[in-house]
Amino acid sequence: MLTQKDQRAIRSKLNNIYKIFISKKDIDYFENEIVQIIKYFNKKNPKKKKNISEKTTLVICYGDSVYSEKKKSIKVFQSFFQKKLKNYFSAIHFLPFYPSSSDSGFAVKDHYKVENKLGNWFDIKSISKSSDVMADMVINHSSARGLWFKNFLKKKEPGKDYFLTVDSKFNTSKVVRPRDHKLLKKIKIFKKTDYLWRTFSSDQIDLNFRNPFVLIQFIKIMIHLINNGVTIFRLDAIAYLWKENGTKCINLKQTHEIIKLLRKIINFLNVQTTLITETNLPEKENLSYFGKNDEANWIYNFSLPPLLIHAFLFENSSFLNKWSKNLPNTKNKNCYLNFIASHDGIGLRPTEGLLNKKALNNFLKRLKKNGSKFSYRKVQNRIKKVYEANITVFDALKKSDYDPKGEFYLERYISAHAIMISFEGIPAIYFNSMFGTSNDEAKFVITGNNRDVNRYRWNLKNISNKLKVNNTKQSIFYNKLCRLLNIRRKQKAFHPNAQRINLDFGSKIYAFKRISKDNKQTIICITNLSSKTQNTIINIKSKKIRNLLNSNINIKNKKCLILKPFETVWLSYL
């Protein structure tokens, strides 16, 4: 039941966002709207709370990552998940499954529908009965071919004043861009000339959050999704939500206040719900979305993928070590969402201030040799900079200057995932990474879209047949990653909030210690990042040391640990 204190908290957030834009009477109205939404939801839903644990793991996929002719794709995926993935993943992140006009689902036409070829809401709800479901709230922008934009042009609801327009006096010189196309589109509308704001593409028009009805609409969308089984929300491109004249138009105060309001709302709901901010930004900016434990529940650990891949390619842990040593431990109810691959590519903004210019340039050169395409952004509306490397993790790690023939491609790949899976936080594995999928060059040739190299869709019969044979590439990668996930699920020291302590064994080794919340288990995770055997001195007083990944531990004189090229050990002791 909502108390007066709870309602005052909602009003406080609304004041922080809208006080200078709308009247007190209007704030009264929107406060009441939100309160009624919460009360109605709680009346219909009994309390349902769930805590994260070492068993919490995510698989990231599209609704049609696995398809079969003449069948709805979500049902096909559900069947495949039940047979091959359910024992290793507690949650499924379905990338946007709404009707969309472009960007593989991120140009949403209607947030209240499921794309017909994928399935329907019943399919989503059915999956949620046995696994947690994560979905995107594509909150920054909407499709230029959707109902909202059509109504915006006609001044009709829903859609009236939903989209952001600015006049010619709006100063965009400081705007931080994630893309390199023209930001503003001149448009003659309502008997005047204005400019539409398009952060991501000409088909994705930014929404106008100065209009509180837009915020209310997304609160209703969130409730609609919860009613259909979704309990984890990815706030897509949230950092760009609010724009102010003459500013960077990113990470603005009102954006943080909107996230705080959404966090307040989900805290008041009977159903346990989680917010994740997707902010592909430099480390300090990304961490700011934890707020004071009052914004995102989880944040993507965006600096991990590029630094991890760099460490393996250059057989040097220096940059990775320095970063993880300074990375703050999370608090209860907050945690990192760790990943190596996503549907886009390897973000490079998160390396700002972490990789120096020379290291970054060498990194890009090596990735290009391995088959990477690159997506760019504009800086100060003039200079083009690489925004992300578009390449699968398999191709990114396939060869290096130290291993030009790719002799150790499998060892590099598995050890990179072993680090990610054991690192503080919750591991998320992109569906295609489970099978060591290579760049989809055929799709790229057809679409010309760099990001499509990492968006391969599997025919159900094809992937099922490959997994039946033990020595296929897909079967080998799948079995090795499943084994890592299965071991993780049984270790209290791998709880998302279990303490992490960085260990320095030199530049050829990367290591950290995890300590369970009850202090009853410690695991030292050690990886040889090089193509040569490495020896390192370890000091563990316990007599009962167990390598969770291999029954054999190569230790000389009880102190010197011998690691084969790219070998990872998880040394557990009480």
Image (spheres, rainbow, N blue to C red):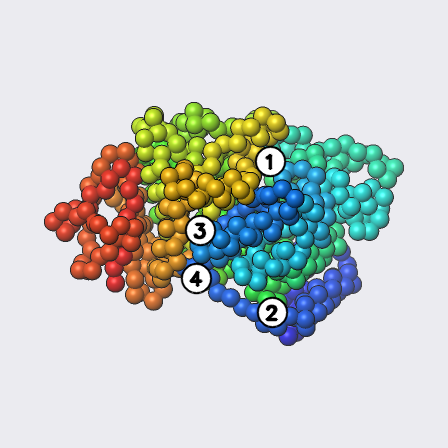
As drawn, the label of residue 53 is 4
Q: x, y percentage for residue 330?
A: 43, 57
Q: Give the class, few, some or many, for how many residues have Cα within 10 Å of label 3's Cα (few <14, many ≥20).
A: many
As drawn, the label of residue 177 is 1
Residue designated by label 2: 270
Apparent side of residue 433 relative to residue 513 in the rendered image (left or right) = right
Q: Quadrant of the C terminus?
A: bottom left
Say which of 316 and 177 sits in front.
Answer: 316
Instruction: Tell me where residue 572 sits by quadrant.
Output: bottom left
Q: Who comes first in sequence, dot 2 or dot 3?
A: 2
From mark 3 to mark 1, how far is it between C-alphas? 29 Å
Amino acid tagged 1: Arg
Amino acid tagged 3: Pro
Residue at x-position 65% and y-position 30%: 181
From mark 1 to mark 4, how far is it between C-alphas? 37 Å
| Tag 2–tag 3 contact (CB < 8 Å) | no
| Tag 4–tag 3 contact (CB < 8 Å) | no
Residue designated by label 3: 427
**Looking at the image, is 488 positioned above or below residue 532?**
below
